[in-house]
Image (spheres, rainbow, N blue to C red):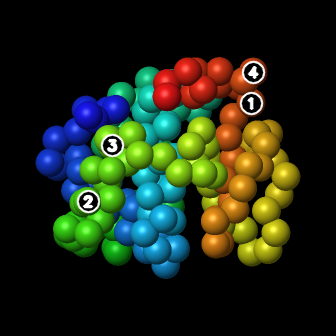
Amino acid sequence: MAVVKATDSDIALLARLLRAEAEGEGILGMMLVGNVGINRIRANCSDFKGLRTIPQMIYQPHAFEAVIHGYFYQRARDREKALARRAINGEYHWPAKYSLWYFKPPGDCPQQWYNQPFVGRFKLHCFYEPTADTCQNVYNTF
């Protein structure tokens, strides 16, 4: 059962994002990117208020660096579409279960990002989940 509404076009769009943002991180790395994106839609807080759809989430200004690179605009592949469906259906993995942010630093993960605490690292990406003061709702949607 989907936790956000998604058309076939939305699934393909999310699949392209997963590949463009984290293909080098493998299947789990791509799933974590999907988790963060779905969290941004469901949480409706912080920088992500009013996001209701996958296209709104992906094309939110400054949300994902991948959308400014040509690799993002290649056709979605079946493997990434399957991963996108899993994220849309609510499959979550640590450290992205409640995370709204991630990034790839040149070294160690900072203990905070956008004033939110570091929760874990997967390969090259650091993940940050909001405090309850910033976004209580992210903890109530699962």
Residue 134 is drawn in which quadrant? top right
Mark 4, Cα crowd under 10 Å, few <14 / some 14-19 / many 20+, is few
Mark 2 residue element: helix
Question: What amino acid is at disc 4?
Answer: Asp
Q: Which residue matches tag 4?
A: 133
Spatial separation of the CA atoms under disc 1 and disc 4: 5 Å
Image vertical order of residue 51 relative to residue 90, above or below: above
N-term mark: 1 or 3: 3
Which residue position is annotated with label 3? 88
38 up-or-down from 123: above or below: above
| Residue with the mark numbered 2 | 82
Spatial CA span between label 1 and label 3: 24 Å
Circles 1 and 3, Cβ within 8 Å, touching? The answer is no
Residue type indicated by callout 2? Ala
Q: Are marks 2 and 1 in contact (CB under 8 Å)?
A: no
Nearer to us of marks 4 and 3 is 3
Q: Residue at x 27, y 50 (%)?
A: 85
First in sequence: mark 4 vs mark 3:
3
* Residue 63: percent from left, percent from top: 51, 49
Local secondary structure at mark 4? helix
Task: Report if the CB atoms under discs 1 and 4 are less than 8 Å apart.
Answer: yes
Residue occupied by mark 1 = 131
- How packed mark 3 is, by other alpha carbons closer than 10 Å (few <14, some 14-19, many 20 or more), is many
Marks 3 and 2 close (CB-CB < 8 Å) = no
Residue type (three-letter) at the residue carrying disc 1: Thr
